Amino acid sequence: MTEPMPHVLLGLCAFTHDSAAALLIDGHLVGFAEEERLSGIKHDRAMPRHAVDWLLAKHSLSAADVDDVAYNFDPARYLPAVLPAPAQLLARPRRAAQRSRSFLKVAARTLRRLGELRRCFPHAQVHAVPHHRAHGLYAFAASGTDHAGVLIVDSLGETETTTIAEARRYPDGSLHYRQHEALTDPASLGYVYGAVTEHLGWRRGDEEGTVMALAALGDPSRFRTVFTEAVRLTGCGFTVDSNLIALRVLSGRASRLTAEFRERTCPPRHVDEPVTEVHRDVAAALQERTEAVMLHLAHRARQYAGASTLCVGGGVAMNCVSIGRIAEAEVTDTMAVPPAPGDSGTAIGAALDTWHQRTGQLGTGAEHTCYLGPAFTNMALPEMPSHGLHARRVPNKARLLAEKLADGTIVGVFIGALEAGPRALGHRSILASPLDPDVVDRLNATVKYREPFRPFAPVVLADTATEYFQLGQRAPYMSMAVPVTDQAHQQIPSIVHANGTARVQTVEAEQNPFLTEVLREFAEITGVPVLINTSLNIKGKPICGTPDMALECLAESGIDALLLEDRWVSAP
């Protein structure tokens, strides 16, 4: 008897920043990859052809075998913003007209993109999935819980910017997902944070984390009034004042801050200008207000759902200090941020939604996992992989790595399947000893080539985490910054940021056996079960997704050596 053909469902984040692809076979997530990790183009906006080709080839499929394609935007949902609000027309008629035209243009462009996808996958049905629903379903599925509140906060998903939902998975696998509340643009916390990031001289949509780090060095009181007026809390969330934050126009050339904002804070900083006290204080006030708004929204989400778990997704969920504040305030028992909370993760969420629409089931495979991308375990590597480098096979790689780290060596690690999301979680990482007092300066100056005030995240064995971090739950995806203990201050001050926190990653053998073994070996040598873990890349480039990218990173940075699967690569 012939076995039935499997149902092949491809989820896509495409034609926008952080393009990615996910594959479900018979409702089970079997792979996910972000295009930038394979193309080498940071925040790649293209159709994720490398990711799609890898997913299909891995399972001996072709484009003709795809039954459904789930896309992470719905063109019809842009249309409500095409008709300007009367208040917008009265206050700023020209800007309101520009905004209206831009939303109509993007709606038409999104519709054309759906047509492109139909041509790429000729036998598939193409589904347009509401952006925030894709975020929400992925955040819930990744948590592995059966009942949760879901808070999505980003810059823009069609017209939505903030949504609160309740999700419940029943024993038979069926799903109930109900959105209780939604804020629409121009009430956008992500838009405000991106606008100020750009104003302070960093790349919007890329370097918001730099501003978050800078904030710890500033005084928020200096500009507290400005940001309180710019983003006002309301009974149903918040509003944004267009006198300070310019009405959004969907164009990279449109200004995002008003003359009044600039007059009340500071002139725009050019990327080459020094960072001064005023920039630190603006960043501090922005971050303080962001934390207040996120805490307010978290309380609302808890009230609606009444669940012990709060799932948070969207670009603002990558603000780990805000996530840490919510956890510290004990708004809920457990905070659950997926490994890829930004737009790339909506490739998984869109696929899950389409499977749910077809079957009533949520789909499986996304829970408690992040290592979903390509692996290169059987690659061939010559003894001299490139000029000036030598590769040798090592038998006990965990022990060797721990010994080298204890000696002060900074090592790139490329092992196993590529992780999902913006944080390197041990498979595409740079590891270093936190016991070296100069390690942060060295990593920033000669390895990562980035601002000296930026901190580095610690990775710790889960069963010893509370000795060093004030942490009440697992933190496997480096998604929250938490206060450190006195022991951490005394033993490993290199991982403590200026605000007394650290963005910690906890590791268990079930999730990452190799990194667990390295930490245990390092603890045996040094007495400390903590390492510094940062991403295997240099500033301006994506995390290395291929061996060639990793070798290039070794050659171009101050990394001392690279553990490439079971080979130790270094200068002879």
Image (spheres, rainbow, N blue to C red):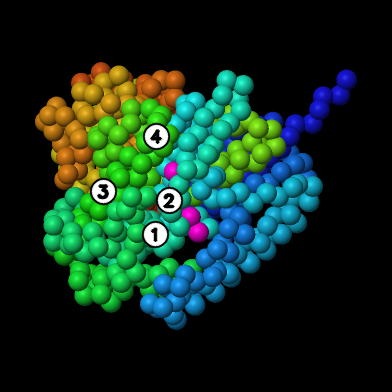
Residue 162 is labelled as 2
Q: Position of residue 255 (x, y in %)?
A: 38, 73
Q: Residues at badges 3 and 4 in contact (C-beta under 8 Å)?
A: no
Q: Which residue is mark 3?
A: 292
Of pointers 2 and 1, the one earlier in the residue sequence: 2
Image-based side of 302 in relation to 450, left or right: right
SS under mark 2: strand
Considering only order in the chain, which callout, 4 or 2, is on the residue closer to the N terminus? 2
Label 2: few (<14), some (14–19) or many (≥20) C-alpha neighbours in 10 Å: many
Mainly helix, strand or loop, the magenta region? Answer: strand
Residue 124 or residue 93, whichever sits in front: 93
Inspect this view and state whether residue 310 appears: yes
Residue 271 image point, x, y percent: 29, 68
- The segment highlighted magenta reads 159-164
User: How many angstroms separate mark 2 from mark 1 (CA)?
Assistant: 8 Å
Residue most toward the right? 1
Q: Nearer the viewer, residue 86 or 82?
A: 86
Q: Is residue 496 left or right of residue 474?
A: left
**What's the mark number on residue 551?**
none
The residue closer to the viewer here, 520 or 323, is 323
- Give me the C-alpha separation between circle 3 and circle 4: 17 Å
Q: CA distance from mark 3 to mark 1?
A: 15 Å
- Tell me the number on the disc at residue 310: 4
Q: N-terminal of the two: label 3 or label 1?
A: 1
The residue that mark 1 highlights is: 187
Q: Of the two numbered discs 4 and 1 on the same chain, state the one appearing first in sequence.
A: 1
Give amino acid for label 3: Ala
